[in-house]
């Protein structure tokens, strides 16, 4: 089955800095890669996703890049703000099937 | 966008009793619903996958007689934790396939505490 590795487990940055979280996956058939933000006591919220036919996608301060050959994808957050502090999960699926999640990254943005 | 309403958000029950968690898709038909369990500071662990009108498929190690899943309609799926024990205390989250471009929508989660 699919295996998703996520690094780092904790990331501390100063407000205004950029943050990068990286994930690798094992199943070459995976073609959908979402990123979720989870705040304490809440369900995951989709912040951005990318499909295997695209190498990069950007939405304001958030971007995701995908390298299918190397089987890794990354989340980039620029101009971080304290409200970006949360746990971020990457995931992978083959489409219309179960999502396999990484173990999560706790992002702490200090004012 | 697609919304999944999950209730209750928090529940405390006595050991030995049963608890039902509901997830409703408000503006779309959820043919497939996923149920996850999440322990503190850990990732989401898939418990089971349910398709409307069919029996749920449980992941290895998940007791189907303890975690009863019903997906009788396209807008409602329920998870019942039977004869709950303190070790069942956890955060339970549902997720539905929206049917549009691989979209998955998550509920807000249910914090179950068994005392």
Image: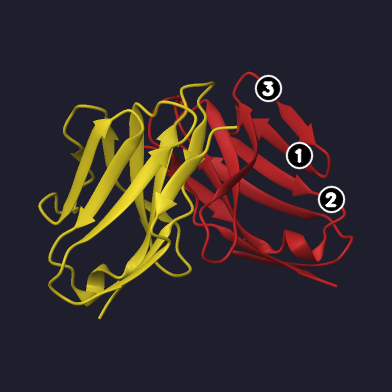
Q: Are marks 3 and 2 in contact (CB under 8 Å)?
A: no
Lower position in the chain sequence, tag 1 or tag 2: 1
Picture quarter with the C terminus of chain B: bottom left
The residue drawn where x is 63% and y is 34% is A49
Depth check: give the residue in front, A75 or B48.
Answer: B48
- Tell me the chain of label 3: A
Depth check: give the residue in front, A90 or A24.
Answer: A90
The chain that appears red in the image is A
Q: Toward which corner of the image does residue A97 lie, by quadrant? A: top left
Neighbour tally class for label 1: few under 14, some 14-19, many 20 plus, Cα within 10 Å: some
Depth check: give the residue in front, B64 or B77.
Answer: B77
- Tell me the chain of label 2: A
The chain that appears yellow in the image is B
* Label disc, if present, on residue A78 of the rendered structure: 2
* Label disc, if present, on residue A63 of the rendered structure: 1
The residue drawn where x is 71% and y is 35% is A65
B73 is higher (above) or lower (below) than B67: above
- Tell me the chain of label 1: A
Disc 3 and disc 2: Cα gap in Å?
A: 21 Å
């Amino acid at each position: 089955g699919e295996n998703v590795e996520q690094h780092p487990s904790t990331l501390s940055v100063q407000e205004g800095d950029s943050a990068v979280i990286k994930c690798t996956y094992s199943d070459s058939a995976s073609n959908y890669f979402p990123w979720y933000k989870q705040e304490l006591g809440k369900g995951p919220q989709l912040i951005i996703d990318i499909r295997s036919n695209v190498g990069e996608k950007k939405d304001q301060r958030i971007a995701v890049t995908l390298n299918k050959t190397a089987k890794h994808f990354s989340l980039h957050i620029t101009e971080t703000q304290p409200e970006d502090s949360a746990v971020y999960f990457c995931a992978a699926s083959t489409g219309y099937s179960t999502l396999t999640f990484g173990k999560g990254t706790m992002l702490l943005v200090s004012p | 966008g697609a919304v999944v309403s999950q209730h209750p958000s928090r529940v405390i029950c006595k050991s030995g009793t049963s608890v039902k968690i509901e997830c409703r898709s408000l503006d779309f038909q959820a043919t497939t619903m996923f149920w996850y369990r999440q322990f503190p500071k850990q990732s989401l662990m898939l418990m089971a996958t349910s398709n409307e009108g069919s029996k749920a498929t449980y992941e290895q190690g998940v007791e189907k007689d303890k975690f009863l899943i019903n997906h009788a309609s396209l807008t409602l799926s329920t998870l019942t934790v039977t004869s709950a024990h303190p070790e069942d205390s956890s955060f339970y989250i549902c997720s539905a396939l929206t049917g549009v471009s691989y979209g998955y929508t998550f509920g807000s989660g249910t914090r179950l505490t068994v005392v």
